[in-house]
Image (tube, grey):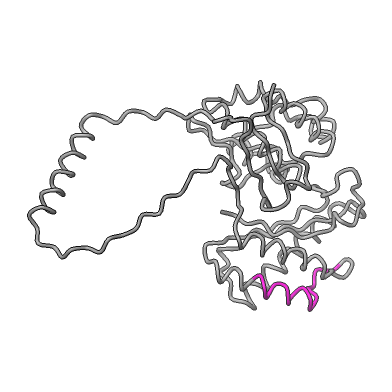
């Protein structure tokens, strides 16, 4: 099938989230049953993730809440949830190691969805993805329900009242305004803003300021970087941030989990206590070695990192 939509993403799991959303754009009336048929939980994914009890890649928020021990393995934020036309919401599995990811990319091609290489997709998609329509493809428009006739009558009466007020009133002439007409682009951009690029650069600098091995104390270089992050957040008061700590697979998994959480918390505490950032704009979590950046090499030093994720 000729490609209709291309997904650009930086991380494997975020790219999968983009694939599912591309499918929902192409098939806006899809139900949960349609999603399960289109993207079955394959044996390959079960083997790769080690979670053989997952019968579906999608869960309701209620199912996710009940499974406390595995909550970190799902896209749980409100802006990450899949919103169907029937009004129901579902949460997608977040754990996508290399083999399972490649299987999903191959599977998506059956629906005319292709995935750009990561080096092509990195710019402007930090923490997210974007969709591009190809070969003249235009997604279907979802028909909306017709408004009841009484509503149109009411709108008409209001319009007449406003017209009479303008004709009979003696208001001062208003200066002419210039309307700005923007052309609607066919490319859907997710989280592509100036401050996103600033935060991405700050994240790189923060990771360059290494923690001492086995400790969660902030180095002076790290504090200097967080000072820049506070400036960005103060300049953009609508920004909310989640700070995630990650480790490689070296050492004890339980210890790595606690250490990654302590390091993320240390960054949040510094921003709140030293820089006055509103605590309601910040959250943190430690994921230990559960989400390696380089899945094929869990011991790689690149897996030891801190991520700044913008919540929009």
The image shows residue 8 at horizontal and vertical percentages of 69, 42
x 84%, y 30%: residue: 47
Q: Nearer the viewer, residue 28 or 43?
A: 28
Magenta stretch in the rendered image: 215-229
x 67%, y 50%: residue: 125
The image shows residue 252 at horizontal and vertical percentages of 90, 54
Q: Nearer the viewer, residue 287 or 307?
A: 307
The image shows residue 183 at horizontal and vertical percentages of 48, 46
x 81%, y 25%: residue: 43
The C terminus, quarter of image: bottom right
The answer to if 46 sits in the magenta stretch is no
Q: Quick check: 163 above or below 243?
A: above
Which secondary structure type mostly characterizes the magenta part of the structure?
Answer: helix
Q: Nearer the viewer, residue 172 or 42?
A: 172
Question: Which quarter of the picture shows residue 31?
Answer: top right
Residue 276 in the figure: left or right of residue 299: left
């Amino acid at each position: 099938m000729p490609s209709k939509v291309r997904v650009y993403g930086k991380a494997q799991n975020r790219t999968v989230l983009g694939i599912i959303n591309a499918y929902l754009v192409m098939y806006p009336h899809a139900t949960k049953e349609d999603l399960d048929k289109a993207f079955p939980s394959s044996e390959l994914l079960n083997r790769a993730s080690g979670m053989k009890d997952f019968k579906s890649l999608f869960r309701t928020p209620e199912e996710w809440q009940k499974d406390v021990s595995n909550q970190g393995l799902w896209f749980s934020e409100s802006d990450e949830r899949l919103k169907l036309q029937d009004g129901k919401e579902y949460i997608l599995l977040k754990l996508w190691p290399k083999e399972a990811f490649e299987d999903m990319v191959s599977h998506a091609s059956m629906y005319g969805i292709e995935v750009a290489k990561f080096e092509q997709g990195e710019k402007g998609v930090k923490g997210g993805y974007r969709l591009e329509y190809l070969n003249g493809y235009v997604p279907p428009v979802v028909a909306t329900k017709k408004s009841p006739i009484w509503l149109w009558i009411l709108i008409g009466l209001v319009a007449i009242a406003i017209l009479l007020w303008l004709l009979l009133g003696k208001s001062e002439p208003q200066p002419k305004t210039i309307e700005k007409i923007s052309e609607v682009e066919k490319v859907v951009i997710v989280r592509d803003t100036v401050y996103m690029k600033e935060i991405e650069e700050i994240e790189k600098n923060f990771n360059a300021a290494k923690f001492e091995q086995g400790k969660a104390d902030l180095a002076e270089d790290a504090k200097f970087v967080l000072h820049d992050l506070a400036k960005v957040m103060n300049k953009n008061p609508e920004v909310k941030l989640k700070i995630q700590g990650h480790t490689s697979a070296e050492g004890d998994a339980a210890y790595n989990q606690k250490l990654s959480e302590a390091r993320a918390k240390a960054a949040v505490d510094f921003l709140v206590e030293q820089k006055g950032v509103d605590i309601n704009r910040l959250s943190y979590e430690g994921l230990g070695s559960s989400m390696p950046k380089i899945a094929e090499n869990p011991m790689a030093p690149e897996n030891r990192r801190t991520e700044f994720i913008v919540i929009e």
